[in-house]
Amino acid sequence: METEPSIVSRNAQESSTASTPSAIDSVGANERQDNKEEFQNENHWEFSNAELRRLVDESRARADAHWNDLLRSRADVENIRRRAERDVENAHKFALERFSTELLPVKDSLELGLAATVSDAAKLREGMDLTLKMLTNAMAKFGIREVNPTNERFNPELHQAMTVRPNSTVPPNTVLAVYQKGYTLNERLIRPALVIVSRAPENGAAGEA
């Protein structure tokens, strides 16, 4: 019976001795795991830096592309502006080119009429009528219309009254006569017609015809 404690003690010692390698193995495993995680973390940071450099390079490339696009756009705008300036300048210079071309035959006709020795007044008048018709047609092509308001109601937007005459045969404010014809360009007044306008006679007196 005295030997039982010794046996128990040896068993305990053997058990303690047997468990020591396992503890060591556990510590080693933990160290290996820590080393593995540290290695993975180092690789992760290296990958992140490479990724960052790639993103920076891509951003720089996009910025360069946008800058080049901006420069090209500015150049295009400048070219358009210069072309527009030239077009406006040419429009001012040659705005009357077509109109001038239409007037040349009228001038030719007048010169031929002056150079001809015509004793017949009827033929001379016929030539003048033809020249006037040519001029009227040339003006009409460019939107120039005459304002000849005889017997029409006075319109202050198109007519300019030179004088007023009493007249009982027509309503008041009627154009009795035209001193000078007016003209419009594309329905815009460029010269008013100079006219004589009627008014009601005073005291029932007979007006002029």
Image (cartoon, helix red, strand yellow):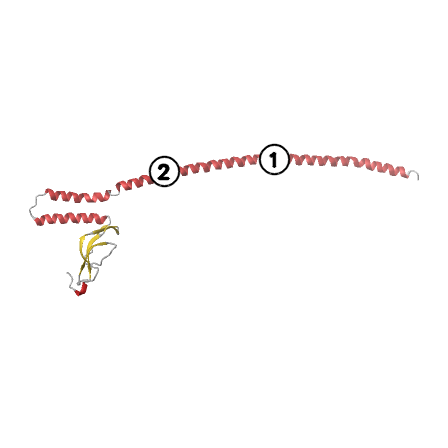
User: Looking at this rendering, what residue extends furthest in the bottom direction?
Assistant: 204
Residue 132 visible: yes
Viewer-side label of 1, 2: 2
* Residue at 89% in and 38% down: 5
User: Looking at this rendering, what residue extends furthest in the left direction?
Assistant: 119
Q: Type of residue at label 2?
A: Asn
Residue 145 screen position, x and y as percent: 22, 51
Q: Nearer the viewer, residue 149 or 67?
A: 149
The answer for how far apart the CA atoms under marks 1 and 2 are is: 51 Å
Residue 174 screen position, x and y as percent: 20, 59
Q: Which residue is mark 1?
A: 45
Q: Residues within 10 Å of mark 1 (few under 14, many from 20)?
A: few
Q: Residues within 10 Å of mark 2 (few under 14, many from 20)?
A: few
Quarter of the rendering occupied by the N terminus: top right
Label 2: state its secondary structure.
Answer: helix
* Residue at 14% in and 48% down: 130
Label 1: state its secondary structure.
Answer: helix
Q: Nearer the viewer, residue 187 or 62?
A: 187
Residue 147 visible: no
* Residue at 88% in and 38% down: 7
> In the figure, 174 relative to 190: above or below?
below
| Quadrant in the rendering for residue 197 | bottom left
Q: Type of residue at label 1?
A: Trp
Classify residue 7 as left or right of residue 124. Answer: right
Instruction: Please give the label number shown on residue 79.
Output: 2
* Residue at 31% in and 39% down: 86
Residue 185 screen position, x and y as percent: 25, 49
Residue 28 screen position, x and y as percent: 73, 34
